Image (cartoon, helix red, strand yellow):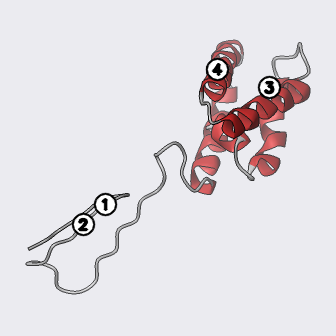
Amino acid sequence: MIVSLMASDLWSAFRGRVVALWSRRGGESAEEQLDVERDEVLASGDAGSEWMAEGVEAALRLRLARLLREDPEVAAALRALAEEAEAALPDAGGRGRVVNTINGDVRDSTVLQGERFGDVHIN
């Protein structure tokens, strides 16, 4: 979720909250480190390679695990951040919000649900 935010235009809206979470641990400058990691995520998109973004995601996951172990109270703040980000991101890693609306009488009709359809023929 954090990597998805980093790669999106929403990062500026969430950056301060992520920095505040990271800063609870102390040590290295959370702000500077997140900026470096975001640059790496953005560069990986330009190169067409996902391995850098995956590496950043793994590093963030490890950092979050340490943070939660050291400060269990951060879980509520992280959960709120994740819920807000999930609602704001257009497609959070394929887990975007889906809303289906079907109007009219469709008892005997065909309804297709999905993201992509190739050559579909319905008889």
Q: Cα distance, mark 4 to mark 1?
A: 32 Å
User: Which comes sooner in the sequence, label 4 or label 1?
Assistant: 4
Which of label 4 and label 1 is nearer to you? 1
| Left or right of residue 70: residue 116 | left
Q: Secondary structure at mark 3?
A: helix
Q: Position of residue 97 (x, y in %)?
A: 47, 56
Q: Position of residue 22 (x, y in %)?
A: 79, 25
Label 1 close to label 2 by CB (< 8 Å): yes
User: Which comes sooner in the sequence, label 3 or label 2?
Assistant: 3
Which residue is under mark 3?
A: 22
Label 3 close to label 2 by CB (< 8 Å): no
**Amino acid type at mark 1:** Phe
Which residue is under mark 1?
A: 117
Which of label 1 and label 2 is nearer to you? 1
Q: Secondary structure at mark 2?
A: loop
User: Which comes sooner in the sequence, label 4 or label 2?
Assistant: 4
Q: Which mark is residue 55?
A: 4
Q: Cα distance, mark 4 to mark 3?
A: 18 Å
Q: Which mark is residue 112?
A: 2
**Amino acid type at mark 3:** Trp
Pick the quarter of the image with the C terminus: bottom left
Task: From the viewer's side, name the closer residue of 27 and 57.
Answer: 57
